[in-house]
Amino acid sequence: MRVVRTIADLRALLRPLREEGKRIGFVPTMGFLHEGHGALIRQSAARCDATVVSIFVNPTQFGPSEDLANYPRDLERDQNLCLEAEATVLFLPEVAEIYPTGFQTHIEPGRLAEPLCGRFRPGHFRGVATVVAKLFNIVQPDLAFFGQKDFQQTVVIRRMARDLNMPVDVVVVPTIREADGLALSSRNTYLDEDARRRALRLSEGLLAARAAFDGGEREAARLVDIARTPLAGVDSVQYLELVDTQNLEPIQGQVDRAAALCVAAYVGSTRLIDNVLLAPLPADAGLSLARSTAGA
């Protein structure tokens, strides 16, 4: 695995691979990697000839009261995970490499950035879309891999790639969970033993709602109520919404199209998000929710 820190070095490394017709996969991350990231890297390694992993804690997606300065970092651990997952290249740019002096161009992601997390994190998806667009231009991957846990992010990125005719297939990989159901997240490191137990309420509610859906329940309000019941054990719930997977608009009445049940809540001072996908069609249709191409 090669480690590079500049755009020029990365492009020089990838150019001959591209000229040879090699398929390049890309996994953008903010570091402090876990098995969820490992799953993305391994999927890329299985489907591509070369896999680039970037680690960049993007300052433009953090609000003024958020945890940029305290975001967890462990580069040695990250490098070992990338190596074990068979990454080909690890890209470690500094902030000045991505946002040089005078930088002033940003991507405005539009209505998809407004609901759910967008209501509570103004400017967040503007920062996400901008840095991902830059990284897509830098790496020029054939496939880019994202985790379903950040569901709204995947919808924003797929729409950006489609609207701007970016020649990249966006692949969304199902959420990786601990044995007890907790979705893997870099922010789980903030949770003490008691907080972790309470954090399980998010996945308990979501998985109970999905089980009810699989059992035939189709009333949106009832599914939300099922997911809400365990959330009494968390400190505060920002949102719990059942939305259309394509436009993120709330679903009311009967669930008659592909849907995502999404939650954001605070456990202590730690903000956690999670979601489950619901589809009123056979499981094969659900797989289409987790895969998208820029040209589709």
Image (tube, rainbow, N blue to C red):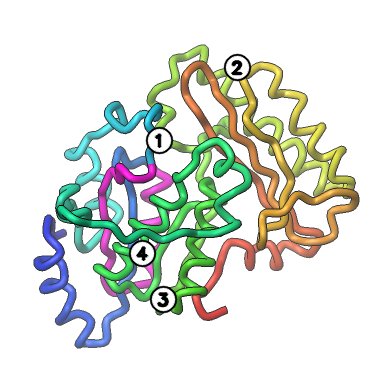
Assign a secondary structure to mark 3: loop
* Left or right for 79, reference 247: left
* Left or right for 9, reference 226: left
Residue 14 sits inside the magenta stretch = no
Assign a secondary structure to mark 4: helix
**Front-lying residue, 173 or 10:** 10
Question: What's the magenta region?
Answer: 35-61
Q: Which residue type carries mark 3?
A: Met
Sort mark 2 into few (<14), some (14-19) or many (20+) by Cα contacts within 10 Å: some
> Any mark on residue 133, and which?
4
Q: Which residue type carries mark 2?
A: Asp
For marks 2 and 3, give the CA distance.
Answer: 41 Å
> Any mark on residue 55, and which?
none
Q: Which residue type carries mark 1?
A: Gly
Sort mark 4 into few (<14), some (14-19) or many (20+) by Cα contacts within 10 Å: some
Mark 4 vs mark 1: in front: 1
> Any mark on residue 63, and which?
1
Q: Which residue is mark 3?
A: 166
Q: Which residue is mark 2?
A: 235
